[in-house]
Image: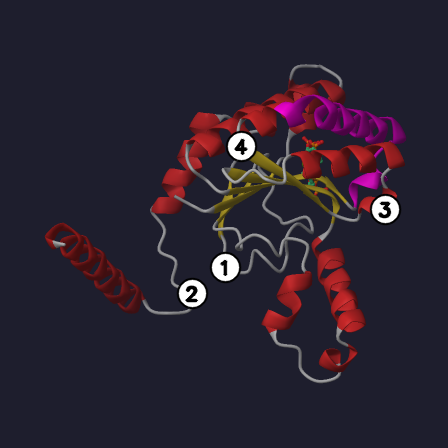
Amino acid sequence: MPVHVAIIMDGNGRWARRRRLPRFAGHKRGVEAVRAVVKACAERGIQFLTLFAFSSENWRRPPEEVSLLMQLFSGALTNEVSKLNRNGIRLRVVGDLSRFDPRIRQLIDEGERRTAHNQRLTLTIAANYGGRWDILQALARLARAHPEAVRGEIPEEALAPYLSMHYAPEPDLFIRTGGEQRLSNFLLWQLAYSELLFTDTLWPDFDAAALDGAIESYRQRERRFGRTSEQVEQAERAQARATRGASETHKTA
Ligand code: IPE
Ligand code: IPE
Ligand code: MG
């Protein structure tokens, strides 16, 4: 099972257009798909789910669409937090929140605070998020905290605590719905070694079964992290022996 799944939820507009509906109908159905996928991830024991809801480039859309997306976001923050809480889900929002209106920022604050003690699943919503922004804000904060550290070479471990998703391991599985095969400035740093999966399914049609399909595809893959296949198999055998050994010691004890 992947520990961390990150998703670009794309295709709401096309879902609506195919039905001759206005784009907002697709966004509304998109919110329903979010509910279903959050539930499915919690049930499957996935610990981190990260959803790209609004990119730093999405402000370029027509003002009516931006405003509708903001309404959906604030509506979800108002109506869904209690349910997240009941299900042991922690909410986090990452991105440059300074551009949101104060009411939305307050709802984000409250939602994060109310769910801060939950440990079953951490749901991160990336809103006004951009991967380049993330790297730059991390560098800026590192430079403010440790001016001496940025004069020489900067090791990865020095930057990591300042990235906006410092609290989560890097995504194991990345999914983009809607058929496009690009990252659109999502988690650039953190996706370095994630398994990438692109599906033609439009986001409003993505459900628990589609998630299971993605997980199945993930399980077929061999994550080598630069090593050879033989090395990976050897390490897996050693790990299996160690686990068997441990359970036998446990039985005799
Ligand atoms: C994704 O669906 C939702 C957001 C970007 C907010 P789109 O609105 O991009 O849908 P398409 O790509 O036009 O079909
Ligand atoms: C990416 O989708 C951002 C989100 C899903 C929030 P877009 O639909 O905005 O991406 P591009 O513009 O097609 O790359
Ligand atoms: Mg799109």
Which residue is the site of mark 2? 225
- Judging from the image, what secondary structure is the residue with disc 3 in? helix
| Amino acid type at image mark 4 | Gly
Q: Is residue 1 left or right of residue 47?
A: left
Are there few (<14), some (14-19), or many (20+) residues within 10 Å of tag 2? few
Mark sitting earlier along the chain (1/4)? 4
Which residue is the site of mark 4? 88
Mark 1 vs mark 4, CA separation in Å: 29 Å
Q: Nearer the viewer, mark 4 or mark 2?
A: 4
Instruction: Please state the horizontal and vertical placement of residue 235, each as a whole percent of the image.
Output: 27, 65
Quadrant of the frame with the N terminus: top left
Most prominent secondary structure in the magenta stretch?
Answer: helix
Mark 1 vs mark 3, CA separation in Å: 30 Å
| Amino acid type at image mark 3 | Ser
Examine the rendered structure and indicate whether residue 79 appears above or below residue 105: above
Residue at point 56% right, 56% down? 191
